[in-house]
Amino acid sequence: MRRSRKLAENAEQDKNGHLWMGTNYVREAKMINSEKVVERRFHERFQVQQGVYALLKNGASKLGQIKNISKGGLAFMYINDAEQIHEATEVDIFLSGYGFILKGIPCKKISDIHVNNFVPFSTFEMRQLGVQFSDVNPQQLAHLGTFIEKYTTRPEV
């Protein structure tokens, strides 16, 4: 068995020092307010420039500005229109004004949370949707790497 020492709730370390949550490899564990918080993402997240958007395509399409991205997934903000998001199937990434578009990346919904709207007196509900890429082909992965290299600003902490 690869697991040995218990670190945090559901996090274990194997004999090589790698962290695991169930069958998922985790990149690092951090101390926040004297509690160990396990970072579940394997890929480093990057902040994106202004004007980078995601279009989620399933029964109910959602368009919004990307907050962060990695080779494993992304998070983007969108205005809630009360249409329920079921399971995501594909996401397109595009950058306005630069002609960059990456279409049809297979994905699945990981989270969909309410976020505070910073526009005074606004009646819109803002949400943040997190998706995990799945079954990305080598060409899409190469384009994603190029996008991260050219159009992100810095790693997100």
Image (spheres, helix red, strand yellow):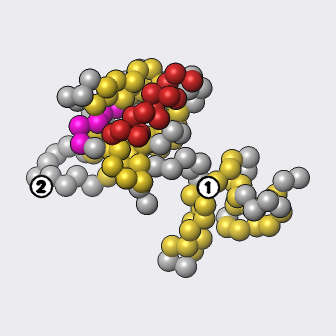
Magenta region, mostly helix, strand or loop?
strand
Q: Is residue 38 left or right of residue 10?
A: left
Dot 1: within a 10 Å radius of its alpha carbon, few (fewer than 14), some, or many (20 or more) residues? some
Dot 2: within a 10 Å radius of its alpha carbon, few (fewer than 14), some, or many (20 or more) residues? few
**Residue 64 in picture, x, y percent from top left:** 29, 35
According to the picture, the residue beneath numbered tag 2 turns out to be 120
The structure residue drawn at horizontal position 71% and vertical position 68%, both measured from the top left corner, is: 7
Earlier along the polypeptide chain: callout 1 or callout 2?
1
Quarter of the image where the C terminus is located = bottom left
Label 1 SS: loop
Magenta-tinted stretch: 50-54
Q: Amino acid at mark 1?
A: Arg
Q: Nearer the viewer, residue 14 or 75?
A: 14
Q: Is residue 18 magenta?
A: no
Whether residue 24 is situated above or below residue 95 in the rendered picture: below
Residue 104 found in image quarter = top left
The structure residue drawn at horizontal position 39% and vertical position 24%, both measured from the top left corner, is: 102
Q: Amino acid at mark 2?
A: Pro
**Residue 58 in picture, x, y percent from top left:** 43, 22
Q: Can residue 34 be seen in the rendering of this structure? A: yes
Q: Is residue 55 left or right of residue 124?
A: right
Q: CA distance from mark 1 to mark 2?
A: 38 Å
The structure residue drawn at horizontal position 22% and vertical position 52%, both measured from the top left corner, is: 117
**Residue 101 in picture, x, y percent from top left:** 34, 24
Labels 1 and 2 touching (C-beta < 8 A): no
The label on residue 112 is none
Q: Nearer the viewer, residue 20 or 71?
A: 71
Q: Is residue 53 magenta?
A: yes
Q: Is residue 40 left or right of residue 6?
A: left
The label on residue 27 is 1
